[in-house]
Amino acid sequence: MARLITFIESQSNALVDEIHRCWDKGDAVCVLDPRAPAPFLDELISTIDPDQVVRADGSIQRRERIHDLIENCALVATTSGTSGHPKAVQHSHLAMEASAHATLKRIGAQIGDGLWLNALPISHIGGFSTITKAQYSQMPLQTFERFEYDRFTEIAKATKVYMSIVRANLSQINPGDFECLILGAGIPPENVPRNASVTYGLTETGSGCVYDGVPLDGVEVKIKEDGGILIAGPMLASCYRDSSPLTDSDGFFHSGDVGAMIDGKLTVWGRAAEMIVTGGEKVVPSLLEERIRTLDAVLDVAVVGIDDEDFGQITVAALITNGPISLSQVKDHVREVLPRYYAPRKIVILESLPKTALGKIKKNQVREIVSEILANTD
């Protein structure tokens, strides 16, 4: 009987080798970030429901599993939990192979021609998927615990390098040194390098399934009347860890994101749960954030809706700044290009924004922080 082995240890080439050994035995794997707080890890383990938990010190915790695994299960991956508690999804080997092959075809990677570098957390699907991309492209994979600019540049100048990367690290390299960069997890830069692809995907879709707005081969995207993004394709996870269904009766996964198809390309506005309705008008946070981010004094921004008796919700912009800025400045700047109701009613200056390991802003935590600040100042 196949087992589910959960690893809680720092990522390395040795860990990737261990993952392949598990697969060779017919077992499934899950990787958790050892830097996470112990209570959070304990809760995740309960959700994942593994047979064994292997830790960096070599200790092995054996458990009695409650839920069955899907047939041919390769990976149980946890969602980022940016808008709630993380879920666990089950990916089959066939789904992961489909994701890898569709990606390799889109980026034009040739079998055995180059290598993959990865410093993204393999505890998240974006980082983990480099393991199967390397496997099915028959290229070596070098896994690093952290982003190492000098080492990566040295390798890239010696051979063709394919690498998944987040925006925060893009400015630390010369993109032209690399064969292909797969850019995910958040807002892309203004000027995307010619050899980079901006991706959209979720844990449930096995990482990126839309590249530069165009679905990968085999992927179908539908937009509901309310803007909800629906996705179907062979790379979808089979179900959640408790066997609850992932898709509707037509085989479509309801992503929880909203967006639109514009000139044949998908534009993602953000999470449906993060849309703000203020005074009867709908505000798309990502559009407002994009505009506010163009202010010289703003380094980063997160827009959230806070409950309000008069307006239902009010729009609040949490800002990271490098100089003084006023609410009136922000409002005037926003109203130059967006409807008047998009202008935030309040701003809050923070020292940092809570983010996942891949750089996604944790909007639920931002909302809690902002609510507490406003409650103490109103």
Image (cartoon, rainbow, N blue to C red):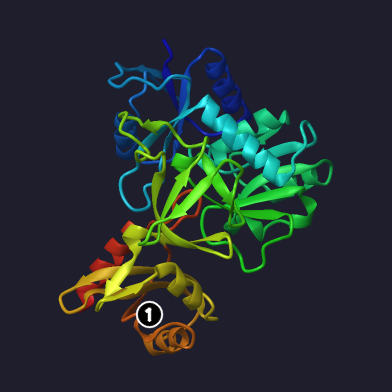
Q: Quadrant of the rendered structure where residue 319 is?
A: bottom left
Which residue sits at x=53%, y=25%? 93
Amino acid residing under circle 1: Tyr
- In the drawing, does residue 101 fall left or right of residue 87? right
- Label 1: state its secondary structure: helix
| Residue 241 % position (x, y) | 34, 30
Say whether residue 207 is left or right of residue 284: right
- Residue at position x 55%, y 81% from top? 296
- Residue at 61%, 31% in the rendered image: 132
Residue 117: give x, y in percent of width and height: 68, 40
Mark yes or no: residue 57 visible. Answer: no
Identify which residue, 183 or 120, lies in the foreground: 183
Query: From the image, which quarter does the N terminus lie in?
Result: top left
Q: Relative to residue 318, is residue 333 depicted above or below? A: below
Residue bearing mark 1 = 342
State whether residue 55 is above or below residue 344.
Answer: above
